[in-house]
Image (cartoon, rainbow, N blue to C red):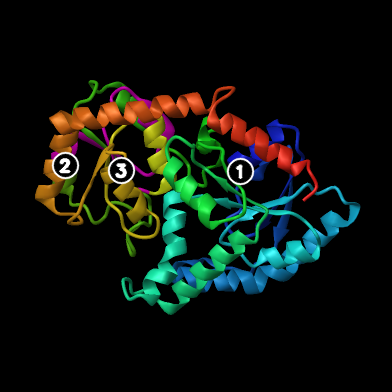
Amino acid sequence: MIQLANMLHHKGFNITIIHTKYSCPNLFNYPHFTLHLIPDGISESEVSTTEVVTMLKLLEDRCIGPFRDILAQLSSDDSIACIIIDAIWYFTQEVADNLKISRIVLRTSSVGSFLAYAAMPLLQDRGYLSIKEGVNKFLVKMVEGTKKASGINFNTFKELEEPELAKLGEKFIVPAFPIGPFHKYFSASSSSLWTQDRTSISWLDTQATNKQPFLWVVRPGLVHGMEWLEILSKEFLEAISERGYIVKWAPQQEVLSHPAIGGFWTHSRWNSTLESICEGVPMICSHFHGDQMVNSRYVNDTWKVGIKLEKGLERVEIETAIRKLMVGKEGEDMRRNIMSLKENLDHSLKPGGSSYQSLDKHISSFRTPV
């Protein structure tokens, strides 16, 4: 969202950000934005122990009133072109309607995974999936809220998801704007909530091109009850010291663009998938939840730019996947495929390209009465 705000500010718009007090990015880095904070009353313990859907309901209950008040105050001089908000905050549509403000949603996942979310309630009704009732209700509300919006922003590009965008157009009247990848306009590192360990780059500088040592990012607190690497034995750390390097966080875009990188073992969230395509780096995919399952299937089956691990974290499958990707014929094919996608992506951002035109069209819609 910060990247999109920077893109629009660069095009001449004044940007006001309404954010919860919890987990607010450091906006001292963005003096060109105006900030309004919502008093959400959220604690660290609530975030760590509350289920995602329950947390979203908690946010709705606590934030809708302050959000309405701030937006009403801002709209009093009739200067708001629109509000752009995450599709998850579906409950803001009623506020926008009452204030007669155009609401545009940002979907931070792929078009393909959004279509999968939209289909889940139907699949649930027909018995193909078993979804928790709360999750099912949330998905229905998110999709319905998106249908009522004035537009949808997607962090993707047309050539990557053309069939999915066509299907979206059949099912949704609301216009869609594939204007990504956002990080090619403004780096994701500038809005990171974590401090990046740049020693990862200096370590990569000492490595030969496309060899098999590994850089491993292990985020602090990722394993419950552990601060960082306590779960790894001293013997293990000594054994890998000559061929591996572990950091708490890394400047991912710079890492992926480094010539020493031959592959990316990823959890398959959309930003990581898109950044890997941008740098022409084939992937090994370990999905866990949410859009990761759809993204990893596209990487493996549709775009053929990586390998989806089908057995979880199974040693033999992992070793086989690494060898295929790094030194096998399959890896060569994946590199050709992903470099073709990278070329299409680069072209999409140039004048006349699909994302370039889509962004211009999107901005024109702000300036046209809705």
Residue extending furthest left?
316
Density class for disc 1 (Cα within 10 Å; few <14, some 14-19, many ≥20) is some
Q: CA distance from mark 1 to mark 2?
A: 35 Å
Provide the secondary structure element on which disc 1 rests.
helix
On screen, residue 303 versus residue 28, left or right, reads left
* Residue underneath mark 3: 302
- The quadrant in which residue 217 appears is top left
* Residue underneath mark 1: 2
On screen, residue 13 versus residue 26, left or right, reads right
Q: Nearer the viewer, residue 348 or 242?
A: 348
Task: Give the magenta range.
Answer: 239-268
Q: CA distance from mark 3 to mark 1?
A: 30 Å
Q: CA distance from mark 3 to mark 2?
A: 18 Å
Q: Position of residue 89 (x, y in %)?
A: 60, 62
- The answer to whether residue 198 is visible is no
Q: Is residue 253 magenta?
A: yes
